[in-house]
Image (cartoon, rainbow, N blue to C red):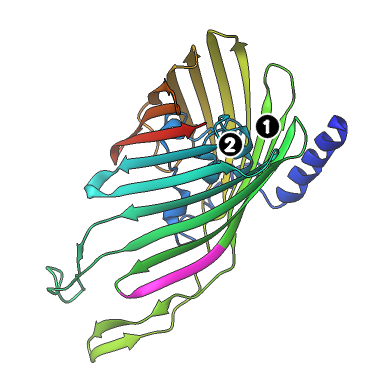
């Protein structure tokens, strides 16, 4: 049975990665080829500290974003909540909230919402570069529902259906898409593989209208080119060279293949002491906005009668955009 599921895992991987670009496409980055870019931004502090090398590790509520199959490895609590906030440049903030419940002996259900907050923006045009006196507030959010199931002690899968909206100044893009995730535990040195396919959906045209001022006067535009979604394929591996009651050291590597950019590679390491204190670090290679040094982070798990409380922090340094700070709070209820 174990061999059969390993074969199934490999066949599924080959099928789903048939169009994946295993080697970088030099000179053809495809940057800016899709909309809804906020869907590519990691949602939690733990994965941020690991530079996103997380699809094989994912075993908490953040797995709803990274790898839906990961929620089958979640804490033994019956209900799990997580909230995260990230602070970016220019007063931009990202929010995430998710919940996972154990729906049956081998099945799990999750819900999540993520959004980007840009604040109010002043409208400018070519003819009025100092502002038109009008302002608008961009809207970016997604809602998702996930189902995951354990097939064997080694193999699990998960699927997410979600709705996302991106809107600017009266023009909105609405789209439905899905994510698919697989996890396989080899059984040696706690080695596990993870595969996820995120943001698969159809191209859709924006709705609404916008007034453009031209030399011959204002013109209203209500027909737009279709916008595609930022689909991404991730393949990861993680193993524990040290794993005992007191110390756990996890090393992870990951390939990221987006449809609108070059491939990147990430490495991450997490050290756990008594499963209470955590130190993390990671690095992503070949990204457009290169890190100035390694991503870092830490976490603490506090046990309580009702279950556990986990606080994580992650920091991502960027050469031009500065440091991004993330903090996550998770609650596990028995």
Q: Nearer the viewer, residue 190 or 286?
A: 190
Residue drawn at x 48%, y 33% as measured from the top left: 333
Mark 2, residues whose alpha carbon is within 10 Å: few (<14), some, or many (≥20)? Answer: many
Direction front: furthest residue: 305
Residue 173 lies in the magenta stretch: yes
Q: Residue 317, how many percent across, how many down? A: 33, 32
Residue range corresponding to the magenta coloring: 170-176
Residue 190 image-quadrant placement: top right
Residue drawn at x 59%, y 67% as measured from the top left: 202
Whether 193 is drawn above or below 215: the answer is: above
- Distance between the Cα atoms at labels 1 and 2? 8 Å
Q: Residue 119, how many percent across, how many down? A: 23, 57
Residue 116 visible to the viewer = yes
Q: Residue 284, how many percent across, how many down? A: 48, 33
Residue 22 image-quadrant placement: top right
Helix, strand or loop under label 1: strand
Mark 1, residues whose alpha carbon is within 10 Å: few (<14), some, or many (≥20)? Answer: many
Circle 1 sits on which residue? Answer: 193
Q: Nearer the viewer, residue 319 or 317?
A: 317
Mark 1 or mark 2: whose residue is earlier in sequence: 2
Circle 2 sits on which residue? Answer: 55
Whether 140 is drawn above or below 331: the answer is: below
Direction bottom: furthest residue: 216
């Amino acid at each position: 049975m174990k061999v059969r599921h390993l074969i199934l895992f490999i066949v599924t991987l080959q099928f789903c990665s048939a169009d994946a670009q295993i080697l970088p496409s030099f000179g053809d980055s495809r940057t800016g080829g899709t909309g809804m870019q906020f869907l590519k931004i990691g949602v939690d502090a733990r994965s941020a500290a690991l530079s996103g090398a997380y699809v094989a590790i994912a075993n908490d509520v953040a797995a709803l974003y990274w790898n839906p199959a990961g929620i089958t490895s979640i804490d033994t609590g019956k209900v799990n909540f997580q909230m995260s906030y990230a602070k970016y440049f220019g007063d931009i903030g990202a929010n995430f909230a998710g919940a996972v419940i154990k729906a049956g002996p081998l099945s799990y259900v999750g819900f999540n919402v993520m959004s980007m907050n840009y604040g109010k923006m002043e409208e400018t045009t070519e003819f009025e570069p100092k502002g038109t006196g009008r302002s608008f507030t961009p809207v970016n959010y997604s809602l998702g529902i996930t189902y995951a199931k354990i097939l064997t002690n080694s193999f699990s899968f998960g699927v997410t259906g979600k709705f996302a909206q991106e809107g600017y100044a009266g023009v909105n893009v609405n789209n439905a898409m899905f994510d698919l995730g697989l996890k396989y535990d080899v059984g040696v040195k706690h080695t596990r593989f993870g595969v996820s396919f995120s943001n698969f959906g159809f191209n859709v045209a924006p709705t609404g209208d916008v007034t453009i001022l031209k030399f011959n006067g204002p013109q209203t535009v209500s027909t737009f080119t279709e916008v595609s979604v930022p689909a991404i394929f991730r393949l990861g591996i993680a193993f524990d060279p040290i794993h005992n009651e007191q110390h756990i050291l996890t090393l992870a590597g990951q390939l990221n293949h987006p449809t609108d950019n070059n491939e990147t590679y990430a490495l991450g390491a997490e050290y756990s002491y008594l499963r209470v204190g955590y130190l993390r670090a990671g690095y992503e290679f070949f990204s457009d906005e290169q890190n100035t040094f390694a991503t870092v982070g830490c976490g603490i798990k506090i046990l309580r009668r009702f279950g556990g409380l986990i606080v994580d922090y992650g920091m991502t340094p960027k050469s031009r955009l500065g440091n991004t700070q993330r903090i996550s709070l998770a609650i596990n209820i028995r």
